[in-house]
């Protein structure tokens, strides 16, 4: 083997090792997130996001924002808000992730008691949304409408159950040059998309390991799906007990059906379990049969986390 061939081979091996290391970092981040290890997940995303392609970097930083917001640390929550503001300012409204960003901003404002602003952000999220985001948007609609009365918000939220009408409204708006809503916490303009967020990661001081908020920030619900997994949940070998993943509990069957339909499009097969609760019936959406809890969590990390689907592992006998 010539010296030149050895050099090329070494270069290829180094590249493969680098890709493998990055993939492991992302996998670690997703697993830490779905298991509730928020600080570990936030740190892993910060390490992984700068290496992501430009088209995926904003989504990676949104995961970082969500993890930071749920650590229970005041400084981390403020940092999450600033990074979210930077992303909104630098991502095009035509990008699928933009509606997720605006929806997350609405939830941040809702937690901070800025109900009118929350309604404005949610309206903008709906106007720039895609069909697969409807389920989570409906949940956020319920939370915001409970705090503020807005005819405009009611109208937009009602359209979520009418895909054709929503598409017609979005087409009528035709806002290819819409400017993102400015925020008070960060108005810095970046030369390139997501660069402001990357800079904030480099310069931000690490959140104290011990310092906790007197009133800890509440967990911010994850946004709607932006990617599709390649496989469905594997079935466990026949046994008297197994683990499953519960993806939602609904008081209305139509909402459960909508979630099942959307996940079926992503090649995730679900079942609806009817559970009597007093005079009401809850419709539980569940997927998979796993021999162990670890298998269920691993599946959630690899298949549900990229879709930002909330879940709860349950032991069934």
Image (cartoon, rainbow, N blue to C red):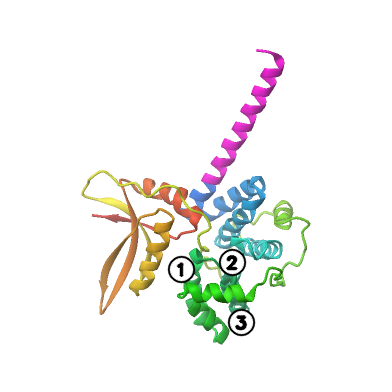
Q: Could you tell me which residue is drawn at 50 percent across and 71 percent down? A: 137
Q: Could you tell me which residue is drawn at 22 percent across and 45 percent down? A: 238
Q: Which residues are magenta?
A: 1-27
Residue 289 in the image, given as x and y percentages of width and height:
31, 50
Contact between marks 2 and 3 (CB within 8 A): the answer is: no
Which secondary structure dominates the residues rendered in magenta? helix
- Quadrant placement of the N terminus: top right
Q: Is residue 58 above or below residue 13?
A: below
Q: Is residue 91 in the magenta section?
A: no
Residue 285 in the image, given as x and y percentages of width and height:
34, 63
Q: Nearer the viewer, mark 2 or mark 3?
A: 2
Question: In the rendered view, does 68 fall on the left or right side of 185?
Answer: left
Residue 266 in the image, given as x and y percentages of width and height:
44, 55
- C-alpha gap between disc 2 and disc 1: 13 Å
Residue marked by disc 3:
116
Q: Which mark is residue 287?
A: none
Classify mark 2: helix, strand or loop: helix
Q: Earlier in the sequence, mark 2 or mark 1?
A: 2
Residue marked by disc 1:
135
Q: Could you tell me which residue is drawn at 50 percent across and 66 percent down? A: 131
Residue marked by disc 2:
99
Classify mark 1: helix, strand or loop: helix
Question: In the rendered view, does 176 fall on the left or right side of 270?
Answer: right
- C-alpha gap between disc 1 and disc 3: 22 Å
Question: In the rendered view, does 242 fall on the left or right side of 136?
Answer: left
Other residues around mark 1 within 10 Å, as few (<14) / some (14–19) / many (≥20): many
- C-alpha gap between disc 2 and disc 3: 18 Å
């Amino acid at each position: 083997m010539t010296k030149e061939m050895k050099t090329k081979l070494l270069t290829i091996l180094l590249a493969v090792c680098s890709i493998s290391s990055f993939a492991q970092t992302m996998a670690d981040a997703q697993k830490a997130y779905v298991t509730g290890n928020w600080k570990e997940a936030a740190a892993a995303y910060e390490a992984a996001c700068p290496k992501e392609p430009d088209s995926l970097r904003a989504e990676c930083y949104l995961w970082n924002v969500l993890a930071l917001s749920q650590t229970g640390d005041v400084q981390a929550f403020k940092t999450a808000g600033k990074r979210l503001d930077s992303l909104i300012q630098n991502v095009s409204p035509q990008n699928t992730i933009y509606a997720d960003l605006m929806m997350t901003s609405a939830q941040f404002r809702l937690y901070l008691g800025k109900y009118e602003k929350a309604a404005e952000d949610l309206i903008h999220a709906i106007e720039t949304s895609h069909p697969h985001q409807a389920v989570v948007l409906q949940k956020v609609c319920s939370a915001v409408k409970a705090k503020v009365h807005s005819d405009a918000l009611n109208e937009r939220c009602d359209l979520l159950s009418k895909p054709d009408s929503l598409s017609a409204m979005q087409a009528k708006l035709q806002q290819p040059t819409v400017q993102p809503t400015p925020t008070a916490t960060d108005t810095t303009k970046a030369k390139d998309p997501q660069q402001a967020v990357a800079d904030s990661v480099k310069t931000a001081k690490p959140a104290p390991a011990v310092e906790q908020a007197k009133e800890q920030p509440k967990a911010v619900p994850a946004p709607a799906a932006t990617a599709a997994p390649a496989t469905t949940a594997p079935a466990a070998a026949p046994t008297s007990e197994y683990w499953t993943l519960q993806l939602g509990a609904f008081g209305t069957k139509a909402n459960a059906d909508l979630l099942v339909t959307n996940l079926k499009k992503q090649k995730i097969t679900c079942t609806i379990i009817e559970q009597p609760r007093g005079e009401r019936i809850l419709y539980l959406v569940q997927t998979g049969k796993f021999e162990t809890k670890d298998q269920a969590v691993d599946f959630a990390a690899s298949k549900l986390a990229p879709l930002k689907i909330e879940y709860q592992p349950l032991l069934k006998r």
